[in-house]
Image (tube, grey):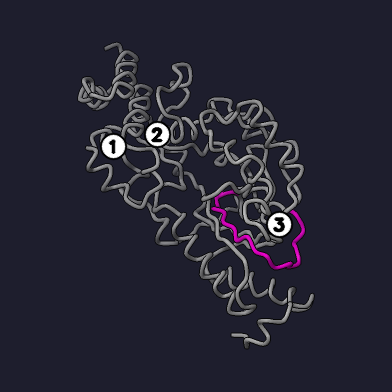
């Protein structure tokens, strides 16, 4: 730990470069596979965001527009911010298992990031420890830790910090590790040296655009959230558009197709982080089994899980759609019949739609 006198001295350029190197070393020690530093200029990204919002492509996610330009102006969100430390944490490779689940209509597909515990708490705790270690070196400094917890343009910041480039599906891609990683940030008031932004390497590839089940990627780098299965199954309240329901297949929470098909994910690394291990056998569970969960069981089983975000009613709504898309086996039909008279009108409407799909 630095002496008080040393902590009080403004850091020299040499000190700042040494500090940046120390920060990256510590970040790796705390389980972050990527760490970079960027400035706070997001002018081009702000223009892109404004255009996206103006076209209403955010659906019912009003919070995307609520904070104005704070999302693209870190210094307005946290006055005094000069740099952003961005980190990435791997949550697993893709392998063949996701494709097998998607091909089996009676099994439920849950986005790979949501199979284990919610990553937010784990990453936030580790980022705070990292911030505390920085304070041990330089003394008290202005900072704030973010993990998808405020209006932060995290992918653009991470790109500028060299963690990866924005793919045509709008996810961040690291040429050495694919796209299966979470992001987090520390806004700081220290003028640290910045890293070179990542260069793009999608080339002419459009696999992510071609494979999207609902054609939500309307052009390279342009996502219409209103058609995106992740939005529809997680963020969207109310009824799902009838025309989109058959396209959802057995995806009940999120969608990974655009990442599964990305050739850069052959470099994705598996992780054995205990928090990210599969819970409740969600990588093998059948739709009928999950549809049978009571609300109490849902709340108990999703404690500490990102799935809790959807809520029980949306969980049932999503599974009803998937059951409507499954083969009409006795198990599938019995599951739907068990909820035919459910009180919630939105769920009931989707159950009825599913039963009609099976001629009932």
Highlighted magenta segment, given as a residue range: 179-198
Q: Residues within 10 Å of mark 2 (few under 14, many from 20)?
A: many
Mark 3 crowdedness (10 Å alpha carbons): few <14, some 14-19, many ≥20 = many
Q: Which quarter of the figure has residue 307?
A: top left
Q: Along the line of sight, which residue is nearer the eye, 215 or 153? A: 153
Q: Secondary structure at mark 1?
A: helix
Which residue in the protein does label 3 denote?
Answer: 162
Location of the N terminus (image quadrant): bottom right
Residue that label 1 marks = 290
As drawn, 245 above or below 49: above
Check whether the beta carbons of the residues at disc 1 and disc 2 lie within 8 A of each other. Answer: yes
Can you give x and y, in whole percent of width and height, for residue 248 in the image? Answer: 45, 27
- Residue at x 39%, y 38% (from the top left corner): 310
- Residue 183 appears left or right of 156: left
Q: CA distance from mark 1 to mark 3?
A: 40 Å
Measured from the top left, where is residue 175 in percent x and y? 68, 52
Quarter-wise, where is residue 275 in the image? bottom left
Compared across the picture, whether 120 is left or right of 1 comes to left
Q: Nearer the viewer, mark 1 or mark 3?
A: 3
Few, some or many residues within 10 Å of mark 1 (<14, 14–19, 20+): some
Residue designated by label 2 = 252
Picture quadrant where residue 340 is located: top left
Specify which label sits upstream in the sequence, 1 or 3.
3
Asked if residue 191 is among those painted magenta in the image, a careful observer would answer yes
């Amino acid at each position: 730990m630095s002496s008080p006198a040393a902590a009080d001295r403004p850091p020299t350029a040499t000190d700042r470069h040494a500090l940046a190197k120390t920060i990256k070393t510590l970040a790796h020690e705390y389980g972050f596979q990527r760490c970079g530093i960027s400035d706070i200029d997001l002018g081009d990204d702000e223009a892109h965001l404004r255009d996206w919002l103006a076209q209403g492509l955010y659906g019912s996610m009003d919070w995307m527009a609520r904070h104005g330009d704070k999302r693209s102006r870190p210094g307005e969100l946290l006055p005094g911010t000069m740099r952003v430390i961005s980190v990435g944490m791997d949550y697993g490779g893709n392998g063949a298992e996701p494709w097998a689940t998607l091909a089996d209509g009676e099994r439920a597909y849950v986005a790979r990031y949501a199979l284990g515990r919610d990553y937010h708490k784990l990453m936030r705790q580790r980022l705070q420890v990292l911030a505390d270690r920085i304070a041990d070196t330089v003394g008290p400094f202005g900072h704030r830790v973010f993990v998808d917890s405020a209006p932060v343009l995290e992918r653009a910041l991470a790109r500028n910090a060299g963690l990866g480039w924005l793919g045509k599906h709008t996810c961040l891609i690291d040429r050495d590790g694919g796209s299966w990683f979470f992001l987090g940030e520390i806004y700081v008031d220290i003028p640290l040296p910045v890293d070179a932004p990542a260069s793009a390497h999608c080339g002419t590839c459009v696999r992510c655009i071609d494979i999207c089940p609902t054609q939500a990627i309307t052009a390279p780098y342009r996502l219409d959230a209103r058609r995106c299965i992740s939005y529809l199954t997680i963020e969207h309240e109310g009824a799902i558009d009838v025309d989109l329901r058959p396209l959802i297949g057995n995806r009940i929470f999120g969608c990974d197709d655009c990442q599964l098909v990305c050739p850069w994910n052959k470099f994705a690394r598996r992780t054995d982080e205990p928090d990210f291990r599969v819970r409740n056998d969600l990588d093998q569970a059948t739709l009928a089994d999950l549809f049978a969960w009571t609300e109490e069981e849902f709340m108990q089983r999703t404690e500490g899980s990102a799935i809790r975000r959807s809520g029980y009613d949306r969980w049932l709504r999503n599974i009803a759609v998937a059951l409507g898309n499954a083969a009409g086996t006795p198990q599938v039909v019995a599951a739907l019949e068990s909820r035919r008279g459910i009180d919630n009108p939105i769920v009931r409407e989707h159950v009825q739609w599913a039963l009609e799909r099976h001629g009932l």
